[in-house]
Amino acid sequence: MGATEIVTRFAPSPTGYLHLGHAYSALFAWHRARAAGGRFLLRIEDIDPTRCRPDFTEAILEDLAWLGLDWDGEVRVQSRHLPEYRATLDALSARGLLYPCFCTRADIAREIAASASAPHGPDGPLYPGTCRRLSSDERAARIARGEPHALRLDMEAALDGPLDFEEEGTRFACEPARFGDAVLARKDVPASYHLCVTHDDALQGVTLVTRGVDLRPATDLHRLLQSLMGWPQPRYAHHPLITDESGRRLAKRDRAATIRDLRAQGVSAAEVRRRAGEGNLPRAPSLF
Ligand code: GLU
Protein backbone atom coordinates (compact mmCIF):
# COMPACT_ATOMS: atom_id res chain seq x y z
CA MET A 1 0.00 0.00 0.00
CA GLY A 2 1.43 3.41 -0.96
CA ALA A 3 1.86 5.94 1.83
CA THR A 4 -0.77 8.19 0.34
CA GLU A 5 -3.29 5.59 -0.73
CA ILE A 6 -6.80 6.37 0.38
CA VAL A 7 -8.68 3.46 1.90
CA THR A 8 -12.25 4.14 2.98
CA ARG A 9 -14.98 1.86 4.18
CA PHE A 10 -18.74 1.68 4.59
CA ALA A 11 -19.63 -0.17 7.79
CA PRO A 12 -23.38 -0.63 8.19
CA SER A 13 -25.04 -2.60 10.97
CA PRO A 14 -27.58 -5.02 9.48
CA THR A 15 -30.48 -4.01 11.71
CA GLY A 16 -32.75 -3.05 8.82
CA TYR A 17 -32.83 -2.20 5.12
CA LEU A 18 -30.61 0.57 3.77
CA HIS A 19 -32.28 3.93 3.31
CA LEU A 20 -31.22 7.02 1.40
CA GLY A 21 -29.08 8.16 4.32
CA HIS A 22 -27.03 4.96 4.10
CA ALA A 23 -26.78 5.31 0.34
CA TYR A 24 -25.35 8.82 0.83
CA SER A 25 -22.86 7.51 3.39
CA ALA A 26 -21.78 4.66 1.13
CA LEU A 27 -21.47 6.95 -1.89
CA PHE A 28 -19.47 9.44 0.18
CA ALA A 29 -16.92 6.78 1.13
CA TRP A 30 -16.92 5.22 -2.35
CA HIS A 31 -16.26 8.53 -4.15
CA ARG A 32 -13.52 9.56 -1.73
CA ALA A 33 -11.68 6.31 -2.46
CA ARG A 34 -12.39 5.99 -6.16
CA ALA A 35 -11.65 9.66 -6.92
CA ALA A 36 -8.15 9.15 -5.49
CA GLY A 37 -7.57 5.75 -7.09
CA GLY A 38 -7.83 4.23 -3.63
CA ARG A 39 -9.68 1.30 -2.13
CA PHE A 40 -13.23 1.12 -0.82
CA LEU A 41 -14.03 -1.62 1.70
CA LEU A 42 -17.30 -2.99 2.97
CA ARG A 43 -17.70 -4.18 6.54
CA ILE A 44 -20.77 -5.59 8.23
CA GLU A 45 -20.95 -4.57 11.89
CA ASP A 46 -23.16 -7.33 13.21
CA ILE A 47 -21.82 -8.18 16.66
CA ASP A 48 -25.23 -7.69 18.29
CA PRO A 49 -27.24 -10.85 17.54
CA THR A 50 -30.38 -9.39 19.11
CA ARG A 51 -30.55 -6.55 16.58
CA CYS A 52 -28.70 -7.81 13.50
CA ARG A 53 -30.09 -10.31 10.98
CA PRO A 54 -28.33 -12.24 8.21
CA ASP A 55 -31.14 -11.45 5.76
CA PHE A 56 -30.46 -7.73 6.27
CA THR A 57 -26.78 -8.40 5.52
CA GLU A 58 -27.76 -10.09 2.26
CA ALA A 59 -30.08 -7.21 1.43
CA ILE A 60 -27.34 -4.63 2.10
CA LEU A 61 -24.92 -6.35 -0.30
CA GLU A 62 -27.61 -6.63 -2.93
CA ASP A 63 -28.79 -3.03 -2.59
CA LEU A 64 -25.24 -1.65 -2.80
CA ALA A 65 -24.48 -3.70 -5.89
CA TRP A 66 -27.78 -2.59 -7.45
CA LEU A 67 -26.80 1.02 -6.77
CA GLY A 68 -23.64 0.36 -8.77
CA LEU A 69 -21.14 0.42 -5.91
CA ASP A 70 -18.26 -2.02 -5.97
CA TRP A 71 -15.94 -2.81 -3.11
CA ASP A 72 -12.44 -4.19 -2.86
CA GLY A 73 -11.58 -7.54 -1.34
CA GLU A 74 -13.82 -9.65 0.85
CA VAL A 75 -16.58 -8.22 2.95
CA ARG A 76 -15.52 -8.33 6.60
CA VAL A 77 -18.32 -9.68 8.78
CA GLN A 78 -17.55 -8.79 12.39
CA SER A 79 -19.50 -11.63 14.02
CA ARG A 80 -17.02 -14.08 12.45
CA HIS A 81 -14.07 -12.44 14.22
CA LEU A 82 -15.02 -12.38 17.90
CA PRO A 83 -11.75 -14.08 19.02
CA GLU A 84 -9.78 -11.17 17.49
CA TYR A 85 -11.70 -8.65 19.57
CA ARG A 86 -11.19 -10.90 22.59
CA ALA A 87 -7.42 -10.73 22.04
CA THR A 88 -7.55 -6.92 22.12
CA LEU A 89 -9.57 -7.01 25.33
CA ASP A 90 -7.03 -9.40 26.82
CA ALA A 91 -4.17 -7.07 25.89
CA LEU A 92 -5.89 -4.10 27.55
CA SER A 93 -6.83 -6.23 30.55
CA ALA A 94 -3.25 -7.40 31.02
CA ARG A 95 -2.23 -3.75 31.37
CA GLY A 96 -4.87 -3.16 34.08
CA LEU A 97 -6.94 -0.90 31.84
CA LEU A 98 -10.21 -2.85 32.03
CA TYR A 99 -12.36 -3.98 34.92
CA PRO A 100 -15.40 -6.25 35.10
CA CYS A 101 -18.71 -4.50 35.74
CA PHE A 102 -21.51 -6.60 37.19
CA CYS A 103 -24.08 -3.80 37.41
CA THR A 104 -27.46 -4.16 35.79
CA ARG A 105 -29.07 -1.16 34.09
CA ALA A 106 -31.32 -0.85 37.15
CA ASP A 107 -28.30 -0.83 39.50
CA ILE A 108 -26.72 1.97 37.49
CA ALA A 109 -29.95 3.98 37.31
CA ARG A 110 -30.39 3.65 41.09
CA GLU A 111 -26.84 4.73 41.79
CA ILE A 112 -27.16 7.71 39.46
CA ALA A 113 -30.50 8.75 41.00
CA ALA A 114 -28.93 8.67 44.46
CA SER A 115 -25.94 10.80 43.53
CA ALA A 116 -25.91 14.59 43.62
CA SER A 117 -24.53 15.00 40.10
CA ALA A 118 -25.14 12.82 37.06
CA PRO A 119 -22.79 13.87 34.29
CA HIS A 120 -23.73 12.81 30.76
CA GLY A 121 -21.41 11.70 27.99
CA PRO A 122 -22.05 11.08 24.28
CA ASP A 123 -23.43 7.59 25.05
CA GLY A 124 -25.67 8.66 27.96
CA PRO A 125 -25.17 9.15 31.70
CA LEU A 126 -21.64 8.39 32.82
CA TYR A 127 -21.13 5.20 34.76
CA PRO A 128 -20.74 6.09 38.44
CA GLY A 129 -17.79 3.74 38.90
CA THR A 130 -19.40 1.28 41.32
CA CYS A 131 -17.50 -1.79 40.11
CA ARG A 132 -14.23 0.11 39.68
CA ARG A 133 -14.08 0.17 43.46
CA LEU A 134 -14.43 -3.60 43.96
CA SER A 135 -11.44 -5.45 45.37
CA SER A 136 -9.63 -7.90 43.13
CA ASP A 137 -10.77 -10.73 45.44
CA GLU A 138 -14.39 -9.78 45.04
CA ARG A 139 -14.02 -9.48 41.28
CA ALA A 140 -12.42 -12.90 41.08
CA ALA A 141 -15.10 -14.47 43.30
CA ARG A 142 -17.97 -13.03 41.30
CA ILE A 143 -16.40 -14.08 37.99
CA ALA A 144 -15.80 -17.57 39.43
CA ARG A 145 -19.52 -17.71 40.36
CA GLY A 146 -20.31 -17.03 36.69
CA GLU A 147 -21.90 -13.65 37.33
CA PRO A 148 -22.52 -11.92 34.00
CA HIS A 149 -20.31 -8.90 33.52
CA ALA A 150 -19.31 -6.26 31.04
CA LEU A 151 -15.75 -5.00 30.65
CA ARG A 152 -15.23 -1.30 31.14
CA LEU A 153 -12.25 0.87 30.28
CA ASP A 154 -10.76 2.46 33.38
CA MET A 155 -10.71 5.92 31.82
CA GLU A 156 -8.48 7.52 34.40
CA ALA A 157 -5.87 4.80 34.04
CA ALA A 158 -6.14 4.89 30.24
CA LEU A 159 -5.66 8.63 29.73
CA ASP A 160 -2.08 9.55 28.94
CA GLY A 161 -1.53 12.93 27.35
CA PRO A 162 -3.42 14.95 24.78
CA LEU A 163 -4.91 13.39 21.65
CA ASP A 164 -6.34 14.89 18.51
CA PHE A 165 -7.60 13.87 15.09
CA GLU A 166 -7.41 15.31 11.61
CA GLU A 167 -10.54 16.18 9.73
CA GLU A 168 -10.24 17.70 6.25
CA GLY A 169 -6.89 19.34 7.04
CA THR A 170 -7.78 20.67 10.51
CA ARG A 171 -6.78 19.07 13.81
CA PHE A 172 -9.36 18.76 16.57
CA ALA A 173 -8.55 18.06 20.21
CA CYS A 174 -10.10 14.89 21.67
CA GLU A 175 -11.79 14.56 25.03
CA PRO A 176 -12.25 10.82 25.53
CA ALA A 177 -12.91 11.37 29.25
CA ARG A 178 -16.39 12.55 28.22
CA PHE A 179 -17.26 8.86 27.83
CA GLY A 180 -16.33 7.95 31.40
CA ASP A 181 -15.57 4.25 31.90
CA ALA A 182 -16.86 3.15 28.49
CA VAL A 183 -18.06 -0.43 27.97
CA LEU A 184 -15.66 -2.27 25.65
CA ALA A 185 -17.30 -5.70 26.03
CA ARG A 186 -20.99 -5.91 26.75
CA LYS A 187 -22.62 -8.45 29.04
CA ASP A 188 -24.51 -10.04 26.17
CA VAL A 189 -21.91 -9.50 23.42
CA PRO A 190 -18.21 -10.14 24.06
CA ALA A 191 -17.19 -6.88 22.34
CA SER A 192 -18.59 -3.41 21.62
CA TYR A 193 -18.98 -1.01 18.70
CA HIS A 194 -16.12 1.22 19.86
CA LEU A 195 -13.71 -1.68 20.22
CA CYS A 196 -14.58 -3.46 16.97
CA VAL A 197 -14.67 -0.39 14.78
CA THR A 198 -11.21 0.80 15.85
CA HIS A 199 -9.79 -2.72 15.71
CA ASP A 200 -11.08 -3.28 12.20
CA ASP A 201 -10.15 0.13 10.81
CA ALA A 202 -6.58 -0.60 11.93
CA LEU A 203 -6.56 -4.20 10.71
CA GLN A 204 -8.01 -3.32 7.33
CA GLY A 205 -5.66 -0.36 6.79
CA VAL A 206 -8.42 2.24 6.59
CA THR A 207 -6.72 5.62 6.13
CA LEU A 208 -9.82 7.80 5.90
CA VAL A 209 -12.76 7.03 8.18
CA THR A 210 -15.93 8.48 6.69
CA ARG A 211 -19.22 8.38 8.57
CA GLY A 212 -22.14 10.51 9.69
CA VAL A 213 -21.54 13.50 11.90
CA ASP A 214 -23.68 11.79 14.58
CA LEU A 215 -20.66 9.54 15.22
CA ARG A 216 -18.17 12.41 15.50
CA PRO A 217 -18.09 12.34 19.33
CA ALA A 218 -17.13 8.65 19.19
CA THR A 219 -13.93 9.60 17.37
CA ASP A 220 -12.51 10.95 20.66
CA LEU A 221 -12.79 7.53 22.26
CA HIS A 222 -11.56 5.77 19.12
CA ARG A 223 -8.40 7.88 19.12
CA LEU A 224 -7.75 6.83 22.71
CA LEU A 225 -8.13 3.14 21.81
CA GLN A 226 -5.83 3.59 18.81
CA SER A 227 -3.25 5.25 21.01
CA LEU A 228 -3.48 2.55 23.70
CA MET A 229 -3.12 -0.23 21.13
CA GLY A 230 -0.43 1.48 19.03
CA TRP A 231 -2.72 1.39 15.99
CA PRO A 232 -2.24 3.85 13.12
CA GLN A 233 -4.17 7.07 13.14
CA PRO A 234 -6.57 7.45 10.21
CA ARG A 235 -7.90 10.78 8.98
CA TYR A 236 -11.61 11.49 9.41
CA ALA A 237 -14.42 12.96 7.35
CA HIS A 238 -17.78 13.19 9.12
CA HIS A 239 -20.55 13.97 6.66
CA PRO A 240 -23.89 15.65 7.28
CA LEU A 241 -26.93 13.43 7.74
CA ILE A 242 -29.54 13.64 5.07
CA THR A 243 -33.03 14.57 6.17
CA ASP A 244 -36.55 14.25 4.76
CA GLU A 245 -38.59 17.20 3.42
CA SER A 246 -39.54 18.21 6.97
CA GLY A 247 -35.90 18.27 8.06
CA ARG A 248 -36.22 15.06 10.07
CA ARG A 249 -33.26 12.72 10.05
CA LEU A 250 -33.92 9.54 8.07
CA ALA A 251 -34.10 6.41 10.17
CA LYS A 252 -34.58 2.73 9.45
CA ARG A 253 -38.19 3.00 10.61
CA ASP A 254 -39.01 5.33 7.67
CA ARG A 255 -39.90 2.52 5.31
CA ALA A 256 -40.72 4.81 2.42
CA ALA A 257 -37.10 5.80 2.13
CA THR A 258 -35.58 2.31 1.86
CA ILE A 259 -33.64 1.50 -1.28
CA ARG A 260 -35.74 -1.68 -1.59
CA ASP A 261 -39.00 0.22 -1.69
CA LEU A 262 -37.76 2.76 -4.18
CA ARG A 263 -36.49 -0.05 -6.35
CA ALA A 264 -39.84 -1.89 -6.08
CA GLN A 265 -41.55 1.33 -7.15
CA GLY A 266 -39.49 1.24 -10.35
CA VAL A 267 -37.12 4.07 -9.40
CA SER A 268 -33.79 3.63 -11.24
CA ALA A 269 -30.45 3.26 -9.47
CA ALA A 270 -29.30 6.55 -11.01
CA GLU A 271 -32.36 8.30 -9.59
CA VAL A 272 -31.85 6.76 -6.13
CA ARG A 273 -28.24 7.97 -6.19
CA ARG A 274 -29.49 11.42 -7.16
CA ARG A 275 -32.09 11.44 -4.37
CA ALA A 276 -29.43 10.29 -1.92
CA GLY A 277 -27.54 13.51 -2.70
CA GLU A 278 -24.74 12.13 -4.86
CA GLY A 279 -24.71 15.42 -6.77
CA ASN A 280 -23.41 17.19 -3.65
CA LEU A 281 -20.40 14.92 -3.30
CA PRO A 282 -16.96 15.97 -4.41
CA ARG A 283 -15.99 13.78 -7.34
CA ALA A 284 -12.88 13.46 -9.42
CA PRO A 285 -13.25 14.70 -13.01
CA SER A 286 -12.51 11.18 -14.25
CA LEU A 287 -15.67 9.90 -12.56
CA PHE A 288 -18.09 12.23 -14.34
N1 GLU B 1 -21.90 0.41 12.17
C1 GLU B 1 -22.10 1.80 12.45
C2 GLU B 1 -23.51 2.20 12.07
O1 GLU B 1 -24.14 1.53 11.27
C3 GLU B 1 -21.17 2.73 11.68
C4 GLU B 1 -19.77 2.60 12.14
C5 GLU B 1 -18.79 3.61 11.62
O2 GLU B 1 -18.89 4.04 10.46
O3 GLU B 1 -17.91 3.97 12.38
O4 GLU B 1 -24.00 3.18 12.59
Image (tube, rainbow, N blue to C red):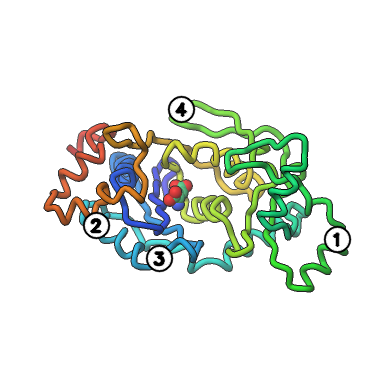
For image coordinates 58% across by 48% down, the residue present is 231
Q: Which residue is mark 3?
A: 53
| Mark toward the start of the polypeptide (3 vs 4) | 3
Secondary structure of the residue carrying tag 1 is helix
> Real-space Cα distance between discs 3 and 1?
38 Å
Residue 65: assigned label: 2
Q: Which residue is mark 1?
A: 136
Residue 277: x %, y % from top left: 25, 36
User: Mark 4 near ligand 1 (CB under 8 Å)?
Assistant: no
- Between circles 1 and 4, the one closer to the viewer is 1
| Mark toward the start of the polypeptide (2 vs 1) | 2
Kind of residue at disc 4: Gly
Residue 269: x %, y % from top left: 17, 49
Q: Which residue is mark 4?
A: 169
For image coordinates 57% across by 56% down, the residue present is 192
**Which is nearer the eye, 264 or 161?**
264
Kind of residue at disc 2: Ala
For image coordinates 68% across by 38% down, the residue present is 177
Q: Is residue 142 left or right of residue 273?
A: right
- Between circles 2 and 1, the one closer to the viewer is 1
Residue 182: assigned label: none
